[in-house]
Image (cartoon, rainbow, N blue to C red):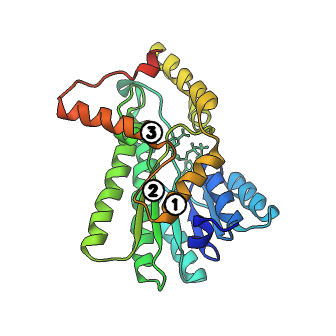
Amino acid sequence: MSTAVADRFGGGIALVTGAGSGLGEAMAARLAADGVHVLVTDVDRDRATAVATACVAAGGSAAAHVLDVADGHAVDALFASVWAEHGSVDLVVSNAGIESGDRVCDMTPEQWRRVMAVNSDGAFHCARSAVPRMAAQERPGVFAVVASTGAVTSLPYQSAYVASKHAALALVQCLDLELRAAETPVQVSALLPNWVRTRIFDDVRRGGDPVDADARATFARMATAIQEQGMEPGRAASLLLEAVARGDFWCFTDPERTAQLFEERALTLRELRPPARPGWLTA
Ligand SMILES: NC(=O)c1ccc[n+]([C@@H]2O[C@H](COP(=O)([O-])OP(=O)(O)OC[C@H]3O[C@@H](n4cnc5c(N)ncnc54)[C@H](O)[C@@H]3O)[C@@H](O)[C@H]2O)c1
């Protein structure tokens, strides 16, 4: 069956960061099923290998690479070797991301920096390395960044995550303006998933539970809500990739909920409202 993703990217090459789990894993699977050769990259070698192996077992084409997106030199080295091998890449998805769960004042500088280094610096490193290469190739590529609906909201106990996602979204918006000013034919897309059922909260828990009791309870509530109400990753990946394939800048998993969050954000700024604790956190 022909799909927008197969029509746009079929026969081409895509690189997805953080593709060893969750949304990235589901995007890799969907792209491979649609005839794209997928470069499955992740900081965790075993996860990347397992996902690439599953893509191939399902009849697709994929290769695994270890990549820590917080390491700009590593990003550039991998991208240089990928372009040297393949000549061009049709789609890069900067997807790798980690959560945070403590109060601002309970976080160590190292915890804060790691979240920023992965979620926002990672998007910068990928943009800096991929976009000029895509601009120089014969068939213009697409550079997509997975931000979050957290990029337009404020939440207690998630300051590093929320700040990093605001930064990632701002980066993509500025990049898009710059590319259009220079008439560079590289498509840029901002992906803002709402809740997706992944292990993102389980991974951050390995670093220890939040110090503060309310932070701990809120974090546990969010982790449960993601599992109980989050969208299935395969469906989220398909919705996002179809929007990218259509050429959209804004790509959502849940357009109605996202529009509501945009409206709340606009009201907060227009009417100078103080930040409000989201109702679902207290419910
Ligand atoms: N799950 C949600 O509800 C949700 C909502 C909005 C946005 N997102 C975003 O989606 C993206 C994917 O998250 P997910 O929910 O699939 O999480 P996940 O934890 O299931 O997968 C994230 C993957 O990124 C990898 N990773 C972590 N640090 C890395 C690094 N430094 N370099 C490379 N890879 C690294 C992990 O090993 C893991 O395989 C993230 O950017 C996240 O912020 C998720």
In this picture, residue 192 sits left or right of residue 6: left
Residue under circle 2?
145
Between residue 184 and residue 223, name the one nearer to us: 184
Q: Residue at x 52, y 60 (%)?
A: 93
Q: Residue at x 65, y 70 (%)?
A: 36
| Number of the label disc, if any, that sits on residue 93 | 1
Is disc 3's CB within 8 Å of ligand 1?
no
* CB-based contact (under 8 Å), mark 2 and mark 1: yes
Would you identify the image quadrant in which residue 281 lies? top left
User: Where residue 43 sits: x, y (%)?
Assistant: 60, 53
Residue found at the very far right of the displayed protein: 57
Q: Nearer the viewer, mark 2 or mark 3?
A: 3
| Number of the label disc, if any, that sits on residue 256 | 3
Please state which amino acid type lies under the numbered disc 2.
Val
Crowding at dot 3, Cα within 10 Å, few <14 / some 14-19 / many 20+, comes out as few
Quadrant in the picture for the N terminus:
bottom right
Crowding at dot 2, Cα within 10 Å, few <14 / some 14-19 / many 20+, comes out as many
Local secondary structure at mark 3: helix
Q: Residue at x 24, y 30 (%)?
A: 268
